[in-house]
């Protein structure tokens, strides 16, 4: 006689019955919908003075279970709101992430089906969906048939794997005399990656950017010449397609030229700017990126996906595969053709989440057109913000935005410390709790920045941001 469901549930609590699972899904659905409804009016940030509350959450491993609905309610209604509102329309700080809904639904399906996509053989059709996503990105970058990519947890890991490929290809195993060139505006993850993979600190060369904060070809060429004379092996140049500080796109064609002449690997960190390639304006502004050997793009930035989705694209797939190939006696047969990719052969990871579905499902549901329109909107918004900011007395826009990041400074009155005045202005603007912006210290100066990349940021909220800046700039001492 089969045991009834309550006995089975008691015996196998990790396998709840369908009624229970449905109730959990319904509760989770109600809570996320409630969250989405409240999102636009939630404060732009609510994470201050939360240490005592965080401390109160410290607890021993629970021996017995608790009510799922109650736990979910606590997370969504109490814990999540004590944070920067990174998913809301007022998030203009750092490089905004995304959080489009179908990606979460994809994660639910991926995690419940829990198929193994680290290799091709265990789930060929699902692995192929992820390959499709990679192919779309490789095409977007202008790479050919022999190119391969890999989805990572984010841009930092993509930068790291890019450097590993370059090091393996150009320097081999004894690379302590190899030199990596980064600009003084490169994201810190690049120099960190170089250190993590074993480059001595003094072989990571920081090249000074020009007045325009761009990494220029001439500076690279000079540094390479000096290092060759010193008996070192110049190997890798990292350019940015949209710096984090100011959104500037480096001189990609010029740097590509130097890399060709000097036989350097060109890695382009397009974690912020890469998906603007889906737009006509973006393509023009990122001209030259197609000459890179490897490119980092970050779907959890420019494709509006939830945090945890980065991507590395490599011009010659063999260069991505070579440092990651491993021999085992117990795994299924590995594939080696254009249709079938074993992701573990192209990445430091073996087991991993099925990231591809999180990208594939939204792109299929909405189509590329919807993403392109949203990215175009961000470019428009940044342009308009730059114009409106420039109309405010004492606000100086530093340069027209290359992409969707506007930088500006509040000009000091005689005798006033300009950096301090800028920090104070930012604090006054943030205190309204409608927008969250972050400044950056750029070459020793505090620079204000508005980065428009949240898919939920539209003209109304950006106009509100500018109105607040105008109001508070007018109130300045
Ligand atoms: C230009 C650039 N590169 C790399 C990164 C690191 O990406 P992630 O935070 O996804 O690791 C960032 C993050 O903002 C970035 O802006």
Image (tube, rainbow, N blue to C red):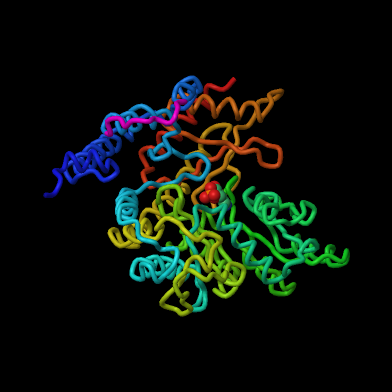
Which residue shows up at 32% across the image and 54% down it? 106
The answer to whether residue 65 is above or below residue 161 is: above
Tell which residue pokes out farthest to the right in this image: 230
**Picture coordinates of residue 352 (x, y %)?**
45, 57
**Picture coordinates of residue 184 (x, y %)?**
70, 50
Q: Nearer the viewer, residue 32 or 470?
A: 32
- The number of numbered badges drawn on the structure is 0
In the image, is 90 to the left or to the right of 361? right
In the image, is 138 to the left or to the right of 448? left
Q: Quadrant of residue 236?
A: bottom right
The answer to whether residue 153 is above or below residue 385 is: below
State whether residue 70 appears in this view: yes
The answer to whether residue 343 is above or below residue 409 is: below
In the picture, the quarter occupied by the C terminus is top right
Q: Quadrant of residue 44?
A: top left
Tell which residue pokes out farthest to the left in this image: 1
Magenta stretch holds residue 66? yes
In the image, is 300 to the left or to the right of 325? left
Which residue shows up at 56% across the image and 22% down it? 476
Q: Nearer the viewer, residue 321 or 143?
A: 321
Magenta stretch holds residue 17? no
Tell which residue pokes out farthest to the front in this image: 1
Which residues fall within the magenta stretch?
A: 58-68
The answer to whether residue 117 is above or below residue 27 is: below
**Picture coordinates of residue 460 (x, y %)?**
35, 38
State whether residue 400 appears in this view: no
**Picture coordinates of residue 245 (x, y %)?**
60, 45
Dominant secondary structure, magenta: loop
């Amino acid at each position: 006689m089969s045991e009834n469901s309550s006995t089975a549930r008691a015996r196998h609590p990790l396998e709840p019955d369908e009624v229970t699972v449905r109730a959990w899904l319904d509760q989770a659905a109600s809570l996320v919908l409630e969250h989405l409804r409240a999102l636009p009016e939630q404060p732009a940030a609510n994470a201050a003075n939360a240490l005592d509350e965080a401390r109160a959450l410290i607890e021993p491993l629970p021996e017995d279970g608790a009510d799922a609905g109650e736990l979910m309610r606590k997370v969504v209604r109490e814990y999540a709101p004590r944070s920067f509102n990174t998913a809301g329309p007022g998030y203009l700080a750092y490089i905004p992430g995304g959080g489009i809904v179908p990606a979460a639904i994809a994660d639910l399906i991926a995690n419940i089906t829990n198929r193994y996509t680290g290799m091709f053989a265990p789930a060929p059709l699902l692995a192929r969906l992820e390959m499709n996503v990679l192919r779309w990105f490789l095409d977007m970058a202008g790479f050919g048939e022999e190119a391969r990519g890999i989805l990572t947890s984010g841009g930092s890991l993509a930068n790291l794997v890019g450097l590993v490929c370059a090091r393996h290809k150009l320097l081999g195993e004894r690379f302590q005399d190899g030199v990596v060139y980064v600009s003084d505006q490169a994201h810190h993850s690049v120099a960190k990656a170089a250190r993590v993979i074993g480059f001595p600190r003094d072989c990571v060369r920081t090249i000074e950017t020009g007045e325009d904060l761009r990494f220029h070809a001439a500076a690279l060429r000079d540094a390479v010449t000096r290092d060759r004379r010193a008996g070192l092996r110049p190997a890798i140049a990292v350019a940015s397609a949209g710096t984090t500080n100011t959104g500037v796109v480096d001189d990609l064609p010029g740097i590509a030229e130097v890399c060709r002449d000097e036989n350097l690997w060109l890695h382009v960190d397009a974690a912020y700017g890469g998906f603007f390639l889906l737009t006509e304006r973006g393509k023009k502004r990122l001209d030259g990126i197609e000459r890179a050997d490897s490119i980092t793009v970050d779907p959890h930035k420019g494709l509006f996906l939830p945090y945890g989705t980065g991507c590395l694209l490599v011009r010659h797939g063999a260069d991505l595969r070579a440092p990651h190939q491993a021999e085992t006696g117990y795994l299924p047969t590995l594939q080696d053709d254009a249709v079938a990719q074993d992701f573990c052969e192209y990445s430091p990871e073996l087991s991993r989440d099925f990231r591809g579905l999180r990208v594939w499902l939204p792109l299929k549901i909405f189509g590329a057109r919807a993403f392109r329109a949203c990215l175009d909107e961000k470019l428009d918004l940044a342009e308009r913000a730059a114009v409106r900011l420039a109309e405010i007395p004492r606000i100086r826009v530093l340069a027209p935005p290359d992409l969707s990041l506007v930088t500006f400074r509040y000009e000091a009155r005689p005798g006033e410390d300009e950096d301090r005045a800028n920090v104070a202005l930012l604090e006054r603007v943030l205190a309204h709790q409608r927008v969250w912006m972050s400044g950056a210290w750029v070459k020793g100066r505090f620079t204000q920045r508005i980065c428009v990349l949240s898919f939920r940021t539209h003209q109304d909220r950006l106009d509100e941001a500018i109105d607040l800046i105008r109001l508070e700039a007018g109130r300045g001492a």
